[in-house]
Amino acid sequence: MKNITKKKLINVIFFFATVVMALLIYWFVKLGYCVEYCSLNTKVGIINPLHQYFVGLAVISGLFLLLPSRFFKQWLLIVLPIATILIVLHASDVSVNTSGILSMSRSEVVRFDMFVLSVVSLLFVVGVYVREKMMKKKSTNK
């Protein structure tokens, strides 16, 4: 039992850190601190997308709690940095003051990108699993 919790420690810490960040941003906005200390552009352009990012990240990392820790560690080192850079670049390309029927706000863009990240994460886990099975089969055939 100790060995299992030691292996999952990084995953559990990451999960709780993302949940805490999402809750802190939520409380910052709901308790009215954002009204006093930040402008509407800051709230719409930075704080709301950050909240969407951390909520999505908490859901994805929570799902990784169900898998072996090797999947999470590889995902954390390979997929997440690239995805975070692409999400920031994609969200920064959207104007803060959007208007129109078909235009998306930064929060909606980040929410869509987090959905794409969840699909990519699923494909990554399946790919790593298949690769490990093939390597295991190849080593037993020798």
Image: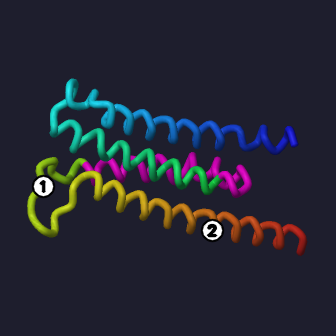
Q: Residue at x 32, y 31 (%)?
A: 31
Q: Residue at x 16, y 63 (%)?
A: 103
Tell me which corner region of the image, top left, top right, bottom left or bottom right, holds residue 50: top left
Describe residue 82's horizontal placement relative to residue 32 as left or right. right
Residue extending furthest toward the top: 37
Describe residue 139's horizontal placement relative to residue 117 as left or right. right
Q: Main secondary structure of the magenta part?
A: helix
Q: Amino acid at mark 2?
A: Gly
Q: Residue 4 at what x, y percent from top left?
A: 81, 45
On residue 67, the disc is none
Describe residue 48's horizontal placement relative to residue 127 as left or right. left
In this rendering, the answer to whether 91 lies above or below 137 is above
Q: Amino acid at mark 1?
A: Thr
Name the residue beneath numbered marker 2.
127
Name the residue beneath numbered marker 1.
98
How many labels sit on residues? 2
The range drawn in magenta is 65-91
Q: Residue 119 at what x, y percent from top left?
A: 49, 67
Spatial CA span between label 1 and label 2: 38 Å
In this orientation, which residue lies closer to the viewer: 86 or 54?
Answer: 54
In this rendering, the answer to whether 95 lies above or below 123 is above
SS category of the residue bearing label 1: loop
Q: Residue at x 29, y 52 (%)?
A: 107
Q: Residue 110 at what x, y percent from top left?
A: 33, 54
Local packing at callout 2 (Cα closer than 10 Å; few below 14, some 14-19, many 20+) is few
The reply to whether the magenta stretch includes residue 72 is: yes
The reply to whether the magenta stretch includes residue 116 is: no
Q: Residue at x 56, y 68 (%)?
A: 123
> Dividing the image into 4 quarters, which one contains the C terminus?
bottom right
Q: Residue 34 at what x, y percent from top left?
A: 25, 31
Local packing at callout 1 (Cα closer than 10 Å; few below 14, some 14-19, many 20+) is few
